[in-house]
Amino acid sequence: MSDSGRALGAQQGEAGEQAQVDVLATSAAGPAAVRGGALRVIAYGVGALISAGGAALLFRQLGLANTGHYVTAVTVVGVVGGVSDLGITAVGLRESAILDQKGRSELFADLLGLRIVLTSVGLAVALALVAIGYASEIVVGVLFAGIGLMLQTIADNLALQLQITLRIGTIAVLEVLRQALTVLGMLLLVLAGGHLLAFLSLSIPVGVVLLVITAQLVRRQRSLRPRFSWQRWRPILMRILPYSAAVAASVLYFRVAVLMVSQLSDTRQESLFGVSYRIIDVLTLVPALLAGTALPIFSRAASEDHERLVYGLGKVFEVALIVGAGAALCIGIGAPFLLRVLGGAQYVPAASVLTIQGIGLGATFVGIVWANGLLSLALYRQILVLNLAGLIGIIILLALLVPDHGARGGAVATAAGEIGAALASGAVLMRRHPSLARSLRVVPRVALAAGVAAASLAIPSLSSLEHTVIAGVVYLLALLLLGAFPAELGDLLPDRLGRSLGLVR
């Protein structure tokens, strides 16, 4: 390509970049959040299906004992990844939304250096601890998986540029690509007769590929170099400490429930609660993706125009409420079928536990939207107070309910905690922005649609799967008839279809 052609391409890229950044400051914030959230959730669903195939390959190749070693190593590295972040990425994303291009690039470089150091320290500590109580093969496996974590950490930091400019489709493709490459690698290892260390090192080549692709996508918009400067890191860490503590309280939330149920009830109740928890734990990522996509939009609006913030929060709340209520409905009705497929008939008694926790999951969809609203306003101390109060509250409820009611008591406690967190976060936001209450007008319509759908349980002689399918269809039709869907959802559909469904006006 000629120099003039390269210059023109660079100018076009810069113009496209500027146009995308400008979306954060326009009334298109709500529609962009809806579309982006939908793309991320769809990508997560595709990735989950791909991962399920990979898990089947992995389990069959490694066998029971080595699968346990694999899970142990991956879990250790996963803890390192979570602890080394503790809100740094979320707060960095929030603050970058209100900076100009130069300031944003500098912040991302600071965050990249900080995450590299924290991840390195975390891995060193993890390796030292694992070396004390585990075989050398697991220690080496943790090292290999840790290198993969480092590569992913760097790639995720580079991808912040994509998120802040609302290139959500690109992020979704990268997420699916990571899962697809991992499963392809597993298939090749199975064909080659690979063993434990080969599978644990698979994240290294996958991480290299994703890192190279991500770097190529963002290299014209931000620095790819990390910056190591305590003087620059110190004010960042001081600002985010309250939020980091809040994230720590949130991480402990469900883990405390699992531990208290195991201590305050018998083995059977522990198992029933445990299988329900594992299902809900996986599904909790969906509302996080849905709401997290809109965080840059919220943050930019919070710094410039609170009317746009209210608009964006309201639209994402409406979508989160609709999806959350639908998820609670389908999990509640389909719990017996879901448990039978995942674990066999022995786990069906956990259906009532899963139904209750499904209600809590529905509240999580709404609660995460309000929590991101608080984050966009930099209300870190309020978030800390809410999360600590929620953690204390659930500990009290668990202590009161689990001894007499076992797994169901634990499910009631966690569901009540999620509902309480959603209500409290919403109340804090609406106290600051009373006009947000307008978005609550959709609540009666969604509740009515869910009630009509739940009435399908009165149809006799149907399996839980058949009841779930009927309830889901009735729920969607009722939402359409009641006009509960935001008009912005029509942007996701072809014009003719959107008009026929009443989503495009």
Image: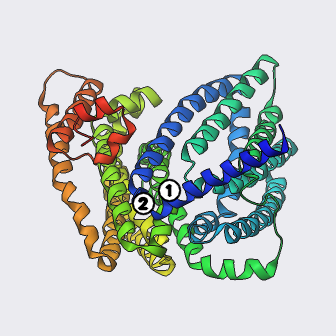
- Spatial distance from mark 2 to mark 1, Cα to Cα? 8 Å
Asked if labels 1 and 2 touch by Cβ distance under 8 angstroms, the answer is yes
Mark 2 neighbour density, 10 Å: few (under 14) some (14–19) many (20 or more): many
> Which is nearer the N-term, disc 2 or disc 1?
1
Answer left or right for 89 relative to 472.
right
351 and 496: which is toward the camera: 496
Residue 368 numbered tag: 2
Is any atom of residue 7 visible in this view? yes
Disc 1 target residue: 292
Residue 302 drawn above or below residue 138: below
Answer left or right for 318 relative to 232.
left
Element type where label 2 sits in the image: helix
Element type where label 1 sits in the image: helix
Instruction: Tell me the residue at 36%/59% (across/down).
Output: 402
Q: Which coloring applies here?
A: rainbow
The label nearer to you, 2 versus 1, is 1
400 and 125: which is toward the camera: 125
Residue 483 screen position, x and y as percent: 18, 45
Residue 86 screen position, x and y as percent: 62, 66
Query: Which residue type does callout 1 highlight?
Result: Gly
Query: Which residue type does callout 2 highlight?
Result: Ile
| Quadrant location, the C terminus | top left
Answer left or right for 260 relative to 351.
right
330 and 504: which is toward the camera: 504
264 and 163: which is toward the camera: 163
Instruction: Tell me the residue at 26%/45% (across/down).
Output: 485
Instruction: Tell me the residue at 74%/33% (across/down).
Output: 66
Instruction: Tell me the residue at 14%/39% (across/down).
Output: 452
| Quadrant location, the N terminus | top right
Residue 58 drawn above or below residue 23: above
Residue 103 drawn above or below residue 191: below
Asked where in the image residue 405 lies, by quadrant, the reply is: bottom left
